[in-house]
Image (tube, rainbow, N blue to C red):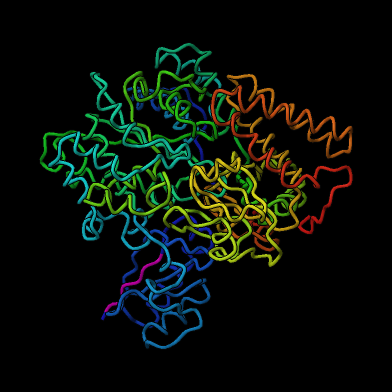
Amino acid sequence: MSFRIFIPRDAGAVAVGAEETVTALEQAAAKRNVAIEIVRTGSRGLFWLEPMLEVATAKGRVAFGPVKEADAASVLDAILADKPHALKLGLTEDIPWLKRQTRLTFARCGVIDPRSVDDYRAHGGYKGLERALTLTSDAILADVTTSGLRGRGGAGFPTGIKWKTVAQTGADRKFIVCNADEGDSGTFADRMIMEGDPFVVIEGMTIAGVTVGATKGYIYIRSEYPHAIEAMNAAIAAARRAGYLGPRICGSQHTFDLEVRVGAGAYVCGEETSLLESLEGRRGIVRAKPPLPAHKGLFGKPTVINNVLSFAAIPFILAGGAKAYADYGMGRSRGTMPIQLAGNVKFGGLFETAFGITLGELVDDVAGGTFTGRPVRAVQVGGPLGAYFPRALFDTPFDYEAFAARDGLIGHAGIVVFDDTVDMAKQARFAMEFCAIESCGKCTPCRIGSTRGVETIDKIRAGERVEQNLAVVEDLCNTMKFGSLCALGGFTPYPVMSALKHFREDFSPAPRRLQAAE
Amino acid sequence: MSVYEPWEPKRGAEIIAEHTHLEGATLVILHALQEAFGYVPQPAIPMVAEALNLSRAEVHGVFTFYHDFRHKPAGKHVLKLCRAEACQAAGGDAVAARAEATLGIAIGNTTPDDRVTLEPIYCLGLCATAPSAMLDGRVVGMLDEARIDALIAEARR
């Protein structure tokens, strides 16, 4: 009898030794003269257990983790003899961290072979597109609107309205663009889904193309994600071979094809208009809006530009799940959000759940606090442009409006946890420094404000005219917030001002510095 | 480590010609040139401009805007350390300081023997297994003193 063993090819698993584990496992199997079939999947997103190995059994998949190179042989022995093992986690689906999630977008990630269209189909893939092909554009738009889906990149703009605008705009050519320039620190959901279930992104983009009448799509992936680029390219080729991309997709009248384009290390290209400039082969300089990309986007044509997770949510919605999707969530934040727990956490990874869960539950309960064992002092939500939250605000529910009401944002739903050794003045300085490095330079508040911000925070940290300089920082933040063209300059004040507001003691002349890490 | 071809105008022209049919091909071509030669040789800039019917200034502007493109070859090995928030929260500053001290260079520089280029990178998307790094395209997570030392030893070999 042959054993079917699943090991992720996800970059997060590879970074902690998945390749070495695979080699060791193959050698151990050869030595024991047993036949094993190793399937490389995406990651389930439980990164403290990576490399996580799963084996197919009659009862379902059984997981082991973390299986390092040195553990491979003993784990194989336990599998062969069906015996207990210290790393055995039981049925994967019953692992509490996974079981308490609501995986709609990530249902297949870590389960299927990301290079196999057949495997994707066998797990419910392409049902959304097949149904969409029987519907009118208006009927598809109605489903997307009913689902309540909002842009998952961070801005939270209703996807249905965006698509409708493009559908109603007449033009000889239209484009679908997938923003896979996931540059926010603490976020990796786009990377995971592209590596673990790339067809769901392709299917979502194809549905968008069919809806608005676009025949060409681009996926703009950052160069820092070589594994995702490879996975998407492989999946696009496979989808083309299977007739899901190209002329007359699935035997319909629709033509749609995709191309991967690779970024070149500019954070600002995650901003949609800057991304479009970059796709056109220019410097990633932000465009003034209006015109909106929906009217004049790529090459001046009407363009749907959405985040990876927005497209990835579409197949479930179109496969008859619009109402079910909308039933999850709270307020105007409908559906589920793939939340990413990162930084100094005990249980880091991807946690997809309905909107409404509190920040405290996510940090203390789901992430289990810090891996250093020290108290949590601050959490940054939403990447380098997101606010730092103190424990006092841990009752904030995960919801676009609730975070905005507390001068924060959920952004792309990355949560970075810091323990009590963090120096918040240093973090505020980093926010300004990062903005200065990455500013496209078009507007003055962002270009100059960030540099002046770094200098002024340096003065504060040196104890120089602290109160006056704090006033300068606040003033700079106001100018950047209200005077910048895009979110880079406009949102950099969030981490800076939140650090100032909630952790003022770190900016005093004799700051409280534990700095055990340094 | 990667092996690159020496700059050769004829080869450069071939690479450019392979991509001119694409819409908005500038970045694609610059990437392809860097992949072949390890950097974007200065003489290639006017060639790209000519092929795409752009001005040299426009192509130069694109080339200099993006952090990825090099104007000269990097060291034999390139070690990129993630310097973003999630890695900072997980002890990335200490890892970076150790790498700088061991190699005797600040981030952003190449060792005098041209063996190792140490660069910052802002997020590899390995934030749940931070701190992380990339050595010549290979990702490594959960860095601690022992792991960064091993990585540097490997890069120096």
Q: Is residue A220 visible?
A: no
Query: Taking B155 as reference, is A94 left or right?
Result: left
Residue drawn 59% across and 34% down?
A491
Query: Taking A379 as reference, is A422 left or right?
Result: right
Above or below, A57 against B71 in this view is: below
Quadrant assignment, res B48: top left
Q: Residue furthest front?
A: A331
In reply to whether residue A514 is colored magenta, the answer given is no
Query: Taking A121 as reference, is A308 left or right?
Result: right
Residue drawn 47% across and 76% down?
A72
What secondary structure is the magenta-colored segment mainly?
strand
Residue drawn 35% across and 45% down?
A232
Q: Position of residue A113 (x, y in %)?
A: 31, 59
Q: Position of residue A287 (x, y in %)?
A: 48, 20
Which span is picked out in magenta? Answer: A2-7
Depth check, front residue: A104 or B1? A104
Quadrant assignment, res A276: top left
Q: Is residue A388 visible?
A: yes
Above or below, B40 against A17 in this view is: above
Q: Position of residue B115 (x, y in %)?
A: 66, 45
In reply to whether residue A6 is colored magenta, the answer given is yes
- Look at the image and tell me in which quarter the N terminus of chain A lies: bottom left
Quadrant assignment, res A93: bottom left
